[in-house]
């Protein structure tokens, strides 16, 4: 069975607009962890290394144990364990509907039979990632879920898709061991299923892992109807996909960056300039509470596959400001969080920057009545201009309805950001 992979380049047009009004000076701005408790960079690095060391001990001690013996049985090839992660802690909790990756293993397969070569571009050697996945519907009603995972490479359109069937024994195929076998994506209230999934990689694709910062993503298209109406999809955090002990240690020692698309879609590498967590300043917009939780200022280094996205920036480089906000919607209707008209006032009257939507998470697009959610705003600057700026004031809002009209009488919330 073949697999579909899309390798397309996209160009972000109109990356960032800066407006000046009155006597404001126009500032040029071209196109384009979740919160831990505050720690010093040294403390975070030590803690991360300790966690990695513990995890690696578990992985190495049992590296010879085969998670998915069916690979050898079907391919008739030689199977060698490359890496085992016994506790990846990849989870996606969608208001009680939980998906988790409990374990995964990477194996190299050589000298396989010809019948098994299609997923490997007709080569007799390749790699297989097997993941042990648990799905539990902890909600009070049946829910439809497609259970799609991916290992993301150079950008959001370049990835290895999951497969629930290839090289998976029938008694471990999630779609077949469910109680409701005729409804392959329907999970009854309280139903819990554990099984295997696989990813197949050619030799070239496995080598590509070493040239990017691969991510593991659990998709979140979940709904209470088979037409997936009003599903408001959202994906899990983009977890670092570890493929070797050495790479795992390097990854663990790095700062934990906010999950904007610069990070999740591998648009760029980041170097931390300044961050502050636990700000927790709350403002009210009608029946919606907006809380400023933290900020990160990072130097942005475009990855090789995404240089074109940043073609209009100067030679000095790019700086990103990512603002993390919590939205508590206590109004009687959903509020959209993808088209908020926020502005960043620079040095009182130097200029105005607008949020770069293409660098912000695409999903979820709204927060339901009575629910809470997260909003990441991203602002991009030429590095040389950023260095002369002294003060940033965020004007958050207004919210807009589906008809394009401002909600709550166009009210906004003002925050002075740490700098």
Image: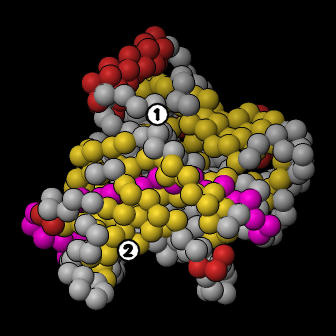
Contact (CB < 8 A) between labels 2 and 1? no
Mark 1 closeness class: few <14, some 14–19, many ≥20 residues within 10 Å: few
Quarter-of-image position of residue 182: bottom right
Q: CA distance from mark 2 to mark 1?
A: 27 Å
- Number of numbered labels in the structure image: 2
Which residue occupies the foreground of this view, 361 or 398? Answer: 398
Q: Earlier in the sequence, mark 2 or mark 1?
A: 1
**According to the image, label 1 marks what residue?**
36
Q: Residue at x 21, y 77 (%)?
A: 28
Location of residue 360 in the rendering, given as x and y in whole percent from the top left corner: 45, 63
Q: Secondary structure at mark 2?
A: strand
Q: Which mark is residue 401?
A: none
- Residue 178 lies, in percent from the top left, at 84, 42
Local SS, label 1: loop
Q: Is residue 295 visible?
A: yes
Which residue has dot 2 on it? 354
Give the camera-side residue of 291 and 333: 291
Picture quarter containing residue 231? bottom right
Q: Is residue 286 left or right of residue 347?
A: right
Q: Is residue 245 visible?
A: no
Quick check: 175 above or below 288?
A: above
Q: Residue at x 58, y 62 (%)?
A: 363
Residue at (13% x, 70% y) in the render: 314
Q: Which region is colored magenta?
A: 307-333
> How are the colours assigned in the image?
secondary structure
Q: Nearer the viewer, residue 184 or 383?
A: 383
Q: Position of residue 273 (x, y in %)?
A: 23, 46
The residue at the point 15 percent across, 59 percent down is 387
Q: Residues within 10 Å of mark 2 (few under 14, many from 20)?
A: many
Q: Tell me: 106 left or right of 363.
A: left
């Amino acid at each position: 069975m073949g697999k579909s992979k899309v390798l397309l380049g996209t160009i972000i047009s109109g990356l960032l607009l800066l407006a000046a009004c009155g006597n404001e000076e126009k500032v040029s701005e071209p196109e384009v962890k979740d919160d831990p408790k505050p720690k010093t960079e040294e403390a975070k690095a030590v803690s991360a290394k300790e966690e990695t060391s513990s995890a690696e001990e578990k992985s190495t001690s049992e590296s010879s144990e085969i998670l998915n013996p069916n690979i050898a049985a079907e391919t008739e090839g030689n199977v060698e364990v490359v890496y085992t992660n016994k506790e990846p802690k990849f989870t996606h909790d969608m208001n009680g509907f939980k998906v988790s990756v409990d374990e995964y293993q990477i194996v190299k397969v050589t000298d396989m039979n010809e019948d098994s070569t299609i997923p490997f571009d007709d080569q007799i050697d390749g790699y297989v990632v097997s993941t042990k996945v648990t799905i539990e519907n902890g909600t009070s009603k049946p829910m439809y879920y497609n259970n799609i995972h991916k290992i993301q490479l150079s950008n959001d359109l370049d990835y290895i898709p999951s497969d629930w069937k290839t090289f998976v024994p029938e008694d471990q195929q999630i779609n077949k061991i469910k109680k409701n076998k005729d409804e392959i994506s329907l999970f009854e209230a309280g139903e819990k299923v554990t099984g295997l999934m696989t990813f197949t990689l050619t030799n070239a694709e496995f080598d590509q892992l070493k040239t990017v910062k691969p991510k593991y993503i659990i998709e979140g298209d979940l709904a209470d109807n088979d037409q997936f109406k009003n599903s408001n999809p959202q994906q899990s955090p983009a977890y670092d996909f570890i493929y070797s002990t050495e790479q795992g240690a390097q990854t663990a020692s790095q700062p934990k960056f906010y999950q904007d698309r610069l990070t999740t879609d591998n648009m760029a590498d980041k170097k931390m300039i300044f961050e502050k967590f636990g700000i927790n300043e709350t403002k009210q917009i009608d029946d919606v509470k907006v809380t400023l939780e933290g900020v990160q200022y990072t130097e942005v280094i475009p990855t090789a596959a995404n240089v074109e996205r940043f073609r209009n920036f100067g030679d000095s480089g790019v700086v990103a400001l990512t603002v993390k906000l919590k939205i508590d919607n206590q109004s009687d209707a959903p509020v959209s969080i993808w088209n908020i008209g926020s502005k960043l006032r620079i040095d009182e009257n130097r200029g105005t920057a607008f949020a770069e939507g293409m660098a912000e998470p695409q999903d979820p697009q709204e927060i339901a009545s009575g629910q809470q959610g997260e909003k990441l705003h991203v602002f991009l600057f030429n590095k040389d201009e950023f260095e002369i700026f002294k003060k940033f004031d965020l004007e958050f809002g207004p919210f807009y309805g589906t008809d394009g009209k401002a909600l709550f009488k166009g009210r906004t919330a003002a925050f002075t950001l740490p700098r």
